[in-house]
Image: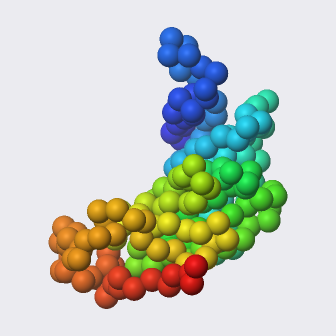
Amino acid sequence: MARFGVAAFALVLGSLGADAPLETLAAFDPTLGQIPESVTTDHEGNLFFSWASTSTIQKRTPDGTITPFGTLPIPVFTLGVKVGPDGCVYTVSLTATPGAFVWRICTAGAVEQFAVLDPNGGPNDLAFDDDGVLNVTDPFLGQIWRVGRSGEGARLAPGPLARRQRREPRAGLPRGRGPTGSRSTTTVRCSSR
């Protein structure tokens, strides 16, 4: 049974200096689906990480205790995870069937769907800007989404990606097709703000 130490966790701790040795904060068993995908911290020193192959977000407290923080209500692949300016944990996910979502967990066990993205996409990571607006990368569609503070209408983030008139085809896929070969769309629901 192979065991993997997650030394990458040591890189996110601000208190570790450049000369500090790497420290394994937790060891996982990938044969049990324990494949950490993304990690973030809060102001209290807790680590939150997603299991790539399950729909669970884990919490590691400063004393080393690891517990499930939230399990998404549908079978998905949880990917990027961040703590938002409101103190809630946000994660992005995609399903084996078309479906792409942003989820929010403000209290342990209380998972809510925060936003729905293009179902042909594949959100991978997320970040909050200085104004608290959520940005989500989608490498399947080659886009960055902006999601309003209330989870309303995901839309393309302003910038060169949003201004493109045509999408470049992904390797091996005909133009206008999503990663599963289904027709993809460039139309998204936007808020009326």
Residue 113 at x, y = what percent?
Answer: 67, 73
* Residue 158, image quadrant: bottom left
Total numbered labels: 0
Q: Residue at x 31, y 79 (%)?
A: 178
Q: How is the image coloured?
A: rainbow
The image quadrant where one finds the C terminus is bottom right
Q: Is residue 51 left or right of residue 113?
A: left
- The location of residue 145, given as percent across then percent down, is 46, 67
The residue positioned farthest toward the bottom in the image shown: 183
Nearest the eye: 111 or 83:
83
Where residue 180 sits: x, y (%)? 33, 79
Q: Residue at x 74, y 51 (%)?
A: 87
Res 62 visible: yes
Q: Indicate whether 125 appears above or below 23.
A: below
Viewport quadrant of the N terminus: top right
Q: Quadrant of residue 167?
A: bottom left
Residue at the top extreme? 19
* 157 w.r.t. 7: above or below: below
Provide residue 182's location: percent of width, then percent of height. 32, 86
**Is residue 90 toward the left or the right of residue 108 in the image?**
left
